[in-house]
Image (spheres, rainbow, N blue to C red):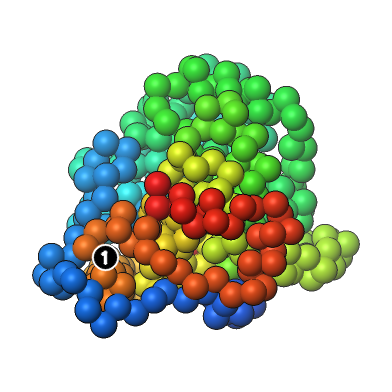
Amino acid sequence: MSSSTMCRKVEHIELALIDEMTYENNCSSIYSDIMLVHQAFPGVSFREVKLTTNFLRYSLEAPIVIEGMTGGHPATAEINEKLALLASKAGVALGIGSQRALIENRSEEVFKTYKIVRDAARDIPVIGNIGITILGKYSYSKIAEVISSIDVDALAVHLNPAQELIQPEGDASFTQDLLSKLADLRKEIAIPIIVKEVGTGLSMEVAEAFAKIGIEIFDVAGACGTSWIKIEGARARRARDLLRAALAEELSSWGIPTPISVIECRYAVPRSIVIASGGVWSSYKAAVNIALGADLVGIARPILKALFNGGIEKGLEYLRLFTEGLKALMFLTGSSNVLELKRKPVYIGSRILSYMRSRGIDIDAYLANKGG
Ligand SMILES: Cc1cc2nc3c(=O)[nH]c(=O)nc-3n(C[C@H](O)[C@H](O)[C@H](O)COP(=O)(O)O)c2cc1C
């Protein structure tokens, strides 16, 4: 691994833990325009409410993915091992941070930081990760070989144009040919591919383009949580790259908020699996996004924060509260399982309805089909 890739991973973790590196108010005004409907007679016993969810041929205890964060630098091996133990204990899916470092440097030291995840977590789905731009630099066979070596159940391919734009050493070439390259990689590897953003949201147009080459799982990573524009902006300031730092300020609220991105993806690719992530940091936000059509939710920053503040125990405590809250909201909306919550009525305010109309979304069709 080049030393710059190595340092960047550690710097990303340090910066991601700073509160200012998130979207302002975490989309509170968007969430206040959406409401779940309380049912005074839920028609179900709280004890019967089930969060169990099938994903990538595993049965999860809850519809949760701990999003891909790290790997590569030797210091990240311990973080990845803890994340794996946490995810395994909680029975949720786990993403690993980008394998770019391993594609660049196949040393045992780098390999260990990724492989440690599968070694510590045999009973949950583990998701590999690359950025789409790497497809322009390395052969499919090399990428496929690296992914297969760490024994993952799916590969997340991230689209991060805003991050690459601000990143001092970024590569912002997201050309059309990458679509056919991804289609070719898909034929080369035997596992499903998830297309994800990293915190700026997926639009209908992007979901449709990737669905056309056979992608069936989308992780929206919307603009409500961790902000890579702000993180890379802070790095640009440190590197005295004043133009990029100023651009980051200018774009600090750019992106598609998570609930809007869920609506866009659910409408554009109705038969796909949609993961709601990007500031989905409370059970209420999780329930809202599922009722808007998401199948699962993804969480990154709060899990990392919990691990740093109190280890696996603190992470488990966070997930316990999250899942109990989700179960309570399912009960109070009269949903005995996640699919039922997906089908429940949801109030959408005039601002979002007007956005949907201006985007050409047939609101009645969306509401009728959001539950699958
Ligand atoms: C420290 C850190 C490192 C990350 N590294 C990656 C990565 O390597 N690849 C990727 O696709 N996303 C990466 N992400 C983005 C997350 O997977 C997720 O999409 C995003 O942070 C939104 O979730 P959140 O708002 O809950 O943090 C990273 C996030 C964090 C906090």
What residue is drawn where x is 63% and y is 68%? 352
Q: Evaluate whether residue 372 shows in this view.
A: yes
* Label 1 within 8 A of ligand 1 by Cβ: no
Res 312 quadrant in image: bottom left
Horizontal side, residue 321 vs residue 253: left or right:
left
Q: Identify which residue, 295 or 352, lies in the foreground.
A: 352
- For the view shown, which residue lies furthest in the front direction? 364
Residue 192 vertical placement versus 273 (above, below): above
Q: Evaluate whether residue 80 shows in this view.
A: no
What residue is drawn where x is 22% and y is 79%? 41
SS for callout 1: loop
Q: Quadrant of the N terminus?
A: top right
- For the view shown, which residue lies furthest in the right direction? 243
- What residue did someone put label 1 on? 335
Horizontal side, residue 281 vs residue 237: left or right:
left
x, y percent for residue 344: 37, 64
> Local crowd at mark 1 within 10 Å, few (<14), some, or many (≥20)?
many
Q: Amino acid at mark 1?
A: Ser
x, y percent for residue 127: 40, 41
Q: Identify which residue, 52 or 308, lies in the foreground.
A: 52
What residue is drawn where x is 22% and y is 54%? 52
Horizontal side, residue 332 vs residue 351: left or right:
left
Residue 367 vertical placement versus 148 (above, below): below
Q: Identify which residue, 304 or 340, lies in the foreground.
A: 340
Residue 266 vertical placement versus 305 (above, below): above
x, y percent for residue 101: 54, 39
Horizontal side, residue 35 vs residue 140: left or right:
left
Res 351 quadrant in image: bottom right
x, y percent for residue 250: 82, 68
Q: Identify which residue, 338 or 235, lies in the foreground.
A: 338
